[in-house]
Amino acid sequence: MIKIYHNSRCRKSRAGYDLLKAAGYNPEVVEYLKTPLTLADFNRILSKLNVPVQNLVRTQEEYFKKQLKGKKFSEREWIQILIENPKLLRRPIIETKLRAVIGDDAENLEDFIKNLDIP
């Protein structure tokens, strides 16, 4: 099982999807702008990424710059902010049964794909 949390309008997200396809995988596509992630989704993904939720935030977005920059939020508050503002989510996120990766760095994504244990 491979899922990609995907925004087809994003160059990096499309590149991540293309890398998966080129490697022979047919991921389940979750268009998170149409089907927002839930609290349970975030908790599951964060446990697989093993990073704080702030690492999922796109700090170059205008909303972040005007409304959030410099403010302190708890993990739970950041998750709620991402649920309410899915455009702030870094993308793509690729998830398997045991692991996940933020795929906006092609090198990290390529390493992740090379080490997949999914047929």
Image: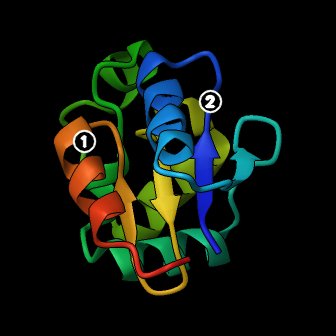
> For residue 71, which numbered disc appears in the image?
1
> For residue 59, which numbered disc appears in the image?
none
> For residue 7, which numbered disc appears in the image?
2
Left or right for 33, reference 78:
right
Q: Position of residue 100 (x, y in %)?
A: 40, 68
Q: Is residue 35 above or below residue 11?
A: below
Q: Nearer the viewer, residue 24 or 5?
A: 24
Q: Position of residue 15 (x, y in %)?
A: 44, 27
The image quadrant where one finds the C terminus is bottom right
Q: Residue at x 26, y 67 (%)?
A: 52
Q: Position of residue 14 (x, y in %)?
A: 53, 26
User: Hey, what amino acid is under mark 2?
Assistant: Asn
Left or right for 82, reference 62:
right
Q: Nearer the viewer, residue 85 or 46?
A: 46
Q: Residue at x 39, y 82 (%)?
A: 47
- Is disc 1 surrounded by few (<14), some (14 to 19) or many (20+) residues within 10 Å? few
Q: Earlier in the sequence, mark 1 or mark 2?
A: 2
Q: Nearer the viewer, residue 104 or 51?
A: 104
Q: How far apart, in angstroms, are the residues tagged by discs 1 and 2?
A: 27 Å
Q: Residue at x 60, y 36 (%)?
A: 85
User: On the image, which quarter does residue 117 sit in?
Assistant: bottom left
User: Hey, what amino acid is under mark 1?
Assistant: Lys
| Total numbered circles | 2
Is residue 85 visible to the viewer in this orientation of the structure? yes
Q: Position of residue 68 (x, y in %)?
A: 34, 33
